[in-house]
Image (spheres, rainbow, N blue to C red):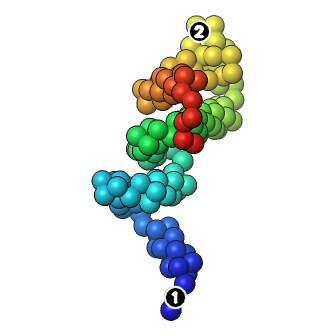
Amino acid sequence: MVSNNRIEMADQRSTARLSINELMKQAKLLESEGKLEDAVKNYHTVIAKDKLHTAAYNRLMIVYHRQKMYKKELSTIKKALAAYENDLLKDQRKWKKLNGGSADLSQRLAKVLGLMQEDGLPRYEEPQVMAWRKRLGKIEQSIKKAKGVKT
C-alpha cells in the first residue's frame, strides 16, 4: 500500500514539470470543478515559475475574493504589485548601467517634467498595475469594514 504522502509528492513533481500554459488550463478546469485548493496550488506554481504572470495573479485574486478570503486577496495583490515594481526597477538599473550618461540626463529631465515619482518609478503605470492598485484600495476598505472575515 502506497502512503498518501508519497502520492502527494509524486503529484507535486508531475505538476512542477507541466508548462505554464498547461498549469493554467488545469487550474481553470479545477476551479470550474470547485476544486479551489488545487487550483490555488496550480496558480502559485505558475507564479513561482513566472513572477510576472498576470493571469495567474488575477485568477488567485478572484478565487480568494469569491471565498471571502480578503486578507489572502490583499496579500496576492501586494505580491503582484511588488513583482512588477521590482521588475521595473531591475530594468531601469540595467538600462542605466548600459547607458550611463544619457540615463542620468533622461532621469533628470523626466523628474523636471513631472514624469517620475520621488522613488524613481515612472508616473505612468501599466493598465493592469493601475487596476491592481484600485483593487487594493477597495479590498483594504472591505477589510476595515468587515468583521469576522476568513483569512
Quadrant position of residue 92? top right
Residue 108 relative to residue 14: left or right: right
Q: Nearer the viewer, residue 141 or 56?
A: 141
Q: Nearer the viewer, residue 10 or 86?
A: 10
Residue 45 seen in this snapshot: yes
Q: Residue at x 35, y 59 (%)?
A: 30
Q: Residue at x 60, y 16 (%)?
A: 116
Residue 69 to residue 46: above or below: above
Q: Amino acid at mark 1?
A: Val
Q: Which mark is residue 114?
A: 2
Q: How many marks?
A: 2
Secondary structure at badge 2 equals loop
Q: Amino acid at mark 2?
A: Gly
Spot the residue most to the front: 148
Quadrant position of residue 87? top right
Q: Position of residue 141 (x, y in %)?
A: 54, 22
In the picture of the structure, the residue carrying the numbered disc 1 is 2
Graded by Cα atoms within 10 Å as few (under 14), some (14 to 19) or many (20 or more), the crowding at tag 1 reads few
Secondary structure at badge 1 equals loop
Q: Nearer the viewer, residue 51 or 24?
A: 24
Q: Residue at x 43, y 30 (%)?
A: 128
Residue 82 relative to residue 61: left or right: right
Residue 18 relative to residue 81: left or right: left
Spot the residue most to the bottom: 1
Residue 74 to residue 22: above or below: above
Residue 75 relative to residue 16: left or right: right
